[in-house]
Image: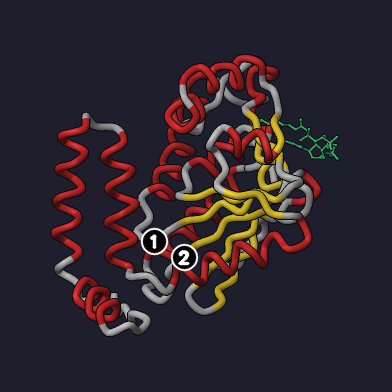
Amino acid sequence: MSYQTIIFTVDGPVAVLTFNRPEKLNALNPEMFAEVRDVLNRVAAAPRIRVLILTGQGRAFIAGADIRVFLDLDPLSARRFAAEAHEAAFQIQEMDIPVIAAVNGFALGGGCEMAMACDIIYASEEARFGQPEINLGIIPAFGGTQRLARLVGKMAAKELILTGRIINAAEARAMGLVAQVFPAPAFMEEVRKIAMNLADKGRVALRAAKQSVDRGFDMDLRNGCSVEIANFALCFASPDAKEGAAAFLEKRPPRFSS
Ligand code: COA
């Protein structure tokens, strides 16, 4: 499939999906959704890809859903639109490999929500985050009311969602939304370095770690800890667990094979 609204590249174990409608600040339209879903399916079926980075071309990561689409929605089509967006967000969240949001510019509305479905958000100093849907007479529909509250707390999430206020990278970091902020010129280089480092880790352990946090987060402590126990046990189904311990004791770097 050749893509019109995204660019997909693979460099060794690291794949990069770049949203590419810069003239519309990468606003998400149905075509872009379909292309993103196609890439996610391809990445899921490609064992040599060990990390996926999402980023945007130009001034935006994604400046939200394409507002033009809203003109034609009625309650039923709006429901379908939101349900499909949620499926895409869950597909990102549930990928077996780490997915990094490299937020280069505006991550507003659906853009902020796509980033929040990723495992880690890194931001360039130029990044801006927000859920401005309230200014359009609507509410977030790609999981924003749920993921933002879980990530930054209920009060901080409501303040952002009710006011529609746009925040910079430093404030997003202070809230715990962003892991690290990098100067714009070196931004993608820094993120790629982190991705390459992640690619050297064991695939089984990475999956077990992200799944334990994600699934456990929505559970009570005892059930969440049960997920951790089961996933810890699962790590020993891979040779990586023995290799990691042996490499440490032999004072050499590990060679993970999963
Ligand atoms: N949907 C559709 N088009 C969008 C868009 C969106 N979410 N965000 C930006 N665009 C388009 C603009 O309409 C403009 O297109 P045009 O040149 O054909 O008029 C182009 O992208 C550039 O945007 P512009 O508004 O001129 O840039 P700016 O630097 O003045 O402002 C923003 C940047 C991000 C503050 C502003 O574009 C904005 O508020 N976008 C909407 C954000 C939003 O509400 N997102 C949630 C949607 S649910």
200 vs 36: above or below: below
Residue at (65%, 30%) from the top-left corner?
130
Q: Specify the quarter for ligand 1.
A: top right
Mark 2 touches mark 1? (CB < 8 Å)? yes
Label 2 Cα neighbours within 10 Å, binned few <14 / some 14-19 / many ≥20: many
Q: Is residue 178 visible?
A: yes
Query: Which x, y percent locates residue 225?
Result: 18, 41
- Name the image quarter holding the C terminus: bottom left
Q: How is the image coloured?
A: secondary structure
Left or right of 45: which side holds 105?
A: right
Instruction: Tell me which amino acid carries mark 1.
Output: Ile
Instruction: Tell me which amino acid carries mark 2.
Output: Val
- Name the image quarter holding the N terminus: bottom right
Q: CA distance from mark 2 to mark 1?
A: 6 Å
Between 83 and 256, the residue placed more toward the observer is 256
Q: Which residue position holds label 1?
A: 97
Give residue 84's quadrant in the image.
top left
Residue at (30%, 50%) from the top-left corner?
211
11 vs 138: above or below: below
Q: Is mark 1 within 8 Å of ligand 1?
A: no
Q: Is residue 77 visible?
A: no
Q: Circle 2 — which element?
A: strand
Q: Circle 1 — which element?
A: loop
Query: Which x, y percent locates residue 20?
Result: 70, 55
Q: Which residue position holds label 2?
A: 51
Between 162 and 21, the residue placed more toward the observer is 162
Query: Which x, y percent locates residue 15?
Result: 53, 68
Between 201 and 68, the residue placed more toward the observer is 201
- Comes first in the chain, label 2 or label 1: 2
Left or right of 90: which side holds 245?
A: left
